[in-house]
Image: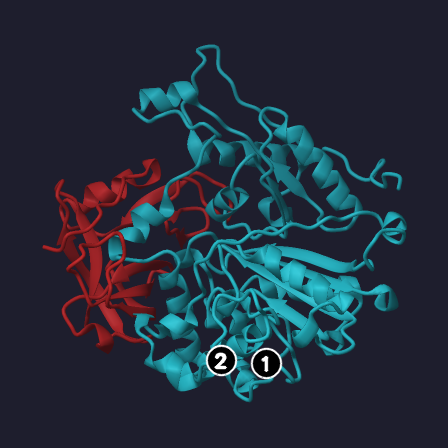
């Protein structure tokens, strides 16, 4: 288990973090616009409506950009690294930052297909990361 | 000079929320969003109409939450009268044609915050800490990770090379050699840049700006008064703002900064094209930052920045003298570098730059970029001859 600065739980993201306790990946969708929203919000940034519902997601996507960090950032243990920070374009149509694990970090490049994986956090939540597929 | 905003703007929608219990169920960004929705409904307008956002804090925070990309923002904080000040500023902005539809918003829920176990926010809702929740746990570094990702994407999409980015650091150092107050003045080569440690791939240490102490100031007055003062006036010929996001994972296209909006708008305002620019001061927090500015301001096509700079045309004697004080890469970078862009542009137009003076500089551009490629301000400056 990697030492990380653990993410706070924002009001808008409580259902997301609760689902990670069972390693379930869910995304907020606006039911008016039929569009996924990321990061989690309780109002849709397109229509300002509050008809937002949480839907299970397959957690697959494509790396949009990647950067290998040899010296860890403040959110990770000083002995971590090298690791790769990525932006992943999920097939659901939203982009999130993450790490890709389970392969040499330098193998991860824009276009790499990835699927959701989980790293445990100390309070029973899990952090969504990705592995190559 | 008289005020020109008389009758130029009107308030067309309002909303407020309060409760006899003294408590509201909604708080934070959701409350701000509800107020904005209600006020827009009252006006018969939608979010798509909005191009300006005011709040007494970080205006880009609520803008990002609503996926707005305003070209007018005002986060002036002067306490309880902030909102009256915002209205004054916005009316002036509207009178000047800077924006069309401005929303101002405020929400504060000290009771609700206490009930939720949160410390009451001193300056209204700050919203979710997006970076702490969705970026920092992945080991991102502020700000290097954001720019490294932008550089990686530019390379993958357009074939830009580390050597081409390195040329920008080399050119900055050549200018710094002629600035006695520059932090670093010894010449460097492309190979030196590539041999410096990789901070976050693909960026090397010498692709990154300095961390130094620094300070600056400017004085602006009316053209009438300016004529009789001690130094030759440098006129604001055009200016424009654009905003895009606050954290990098919300940036729609990492190869296009909001400078693609503020740059052309400021140039049009000034009635100039890129060919008219004698000297450019373009925010160089990282080499990739400067490369993106060249494309977005229109000096070359999107994706062609690498090929554009590789002959050293930004350096001394080049076709497009850029960051003539040595820039954030070699002169100074205390964190918010934008003031130095203005100061150097003014000095170049006054002809007071000594050894590094660009001959016959009549039009200069100061192009600032804040956050992580988040918000740009482009200012076109000219001399008496180009006014």
Name the spot of residue B137 as percent of width and height, x first: 25, 52
Residue B148 left/right relative to B89: left
**Residue lying furthest bottom in this view?**
B311
B336 w.r.t. B387: above or below: above
Label pair 2/1, CB-CB below 8 angstroms = yes
Q: Quadrant of residue B326?
A: bottom right
Q: Which residue is mark 2?
A: B170
Q: Quadrant of the C terminus of chain B?
A: bottom right
B258 w.r.t. A12: above or below: below
Name the spot of residue A29 as percent of width and height, x first: 37, 49
Under circle 2, the secondary element is helix
- The tint chain A carries is red
Q: Which residue is mark 1?
A: B315
User: Which chain does the numbered disc 1 sit on?
Assistant: B
User: Which chain does the numbered disc 2 sit on?
Assistant: B
Characterize the local packing of mark 1: few (<14), some (14-19) or many (20 or more) Cα atoms within 10 angstroms.
Answer: many
Q: Which chain is cyan?
A: B
Name the spot of residue B180 as percent of width and height, x first: 57, 68
């Amino acid at each position: 288990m990697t030492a990380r600065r653990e993410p706070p739980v924002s009001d808008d993201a409580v259902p997301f973090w609760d689902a990670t306790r069972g390693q379930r990946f869910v995304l907020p969708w606006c039911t008016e616009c039929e569009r996924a929203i990321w990061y989690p919000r309780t109002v849709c940034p397109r229509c300002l409506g509050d008809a937002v519902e949480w839907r299970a997601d397959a957690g697959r996507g494509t790396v949009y950009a990647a950067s290998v960090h040899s010296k860890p950032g403040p959110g990770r243990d000083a002995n971590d690294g090298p690791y790769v920070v990525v932006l992943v374009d999920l097939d659901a149509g939203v982009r999130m930052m993450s790490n890709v694990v389970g392969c040499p970090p330098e193998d991860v490049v824009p276009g790499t297909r990835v699927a959701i994986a989980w790293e445990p956090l100390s309070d029973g939540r899990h952090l969504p990361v990705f592995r190559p597929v | 000079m008289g005020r020109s905003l008389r009758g130029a703007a009107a308030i067309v929608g309002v909303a407020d929320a309060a409760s006899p219990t003294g408590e509201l169920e909604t708080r934070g960004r959701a409350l701000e969003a509800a107020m904005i929705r209600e006020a827009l409904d009252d006006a018969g307008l939608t979010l798509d109409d909005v191009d300006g956002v005011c709040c007494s804090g970080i205006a880009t925070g609520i803008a990002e939450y609503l996926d707005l990309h305003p070209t007018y923002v005002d986060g002036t904080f002067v306490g309880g009268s902030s909102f009256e000040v915002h209205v004054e500023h916005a009316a002036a902005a509207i009178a000047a044609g800077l924006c069309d539809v401005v929303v101002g918003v405020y929400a504060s829920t000290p009771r609700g915050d206490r009930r939720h176990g949160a410390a009451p926010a001193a300056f209204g809702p700050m919203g979710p800490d997006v970076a702490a929740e969705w970026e920092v746990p992945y080991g991102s570094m502020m700000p290097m990770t954001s720019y490294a990702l932008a550089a990686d994407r530019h390379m993958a999409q357009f074939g830009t090379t580390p050597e081409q980015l390195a040329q920008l650091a080399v050119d900055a150092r050549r200018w710094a050699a002629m600035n006695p107050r520059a932090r670093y003045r010894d010449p460097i080569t492309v190979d030196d840049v590539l041999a410096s440690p990789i901070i976050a791939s693909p960026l090397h240490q010498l692709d990154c700006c300095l961390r130094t102490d620094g300070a600056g100031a400017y004085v602006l007055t009316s053209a009438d008064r300016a004529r009789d003062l001690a130094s030759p006036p440098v006129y604001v010929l055009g200016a424009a703002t654009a905003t895009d996001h606050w954290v990098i994972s919300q940036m729609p296209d990492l190869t296009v900064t909001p400078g693609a909006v503020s740059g052309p708008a400021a140039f049009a305002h000034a009635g100039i094209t890129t060919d008219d620019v004698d000297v450019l001061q373009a925010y160089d927090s990282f080499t990739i930052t400067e490369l993106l500015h060249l494309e977005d301001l229109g000096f070359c096509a999107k994706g062609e920045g690498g090929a554009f700079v590789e002959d050293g045309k930004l350096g001394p004697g080049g076709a497009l003298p850029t960051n003539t004080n040595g820039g954030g890469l070699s002169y100074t970078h205390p964190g918010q570098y934008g003031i130095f862009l203005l100061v150097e542009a003014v000095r170049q137009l006054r002809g007071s730059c000594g050894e590094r003076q660009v001959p016959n500089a009549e039009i200069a551009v100061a192009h600032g970029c804040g956050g992580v490629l988040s918000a740009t301000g482009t200012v076109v400056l000219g001399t008496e001859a180009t006014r």
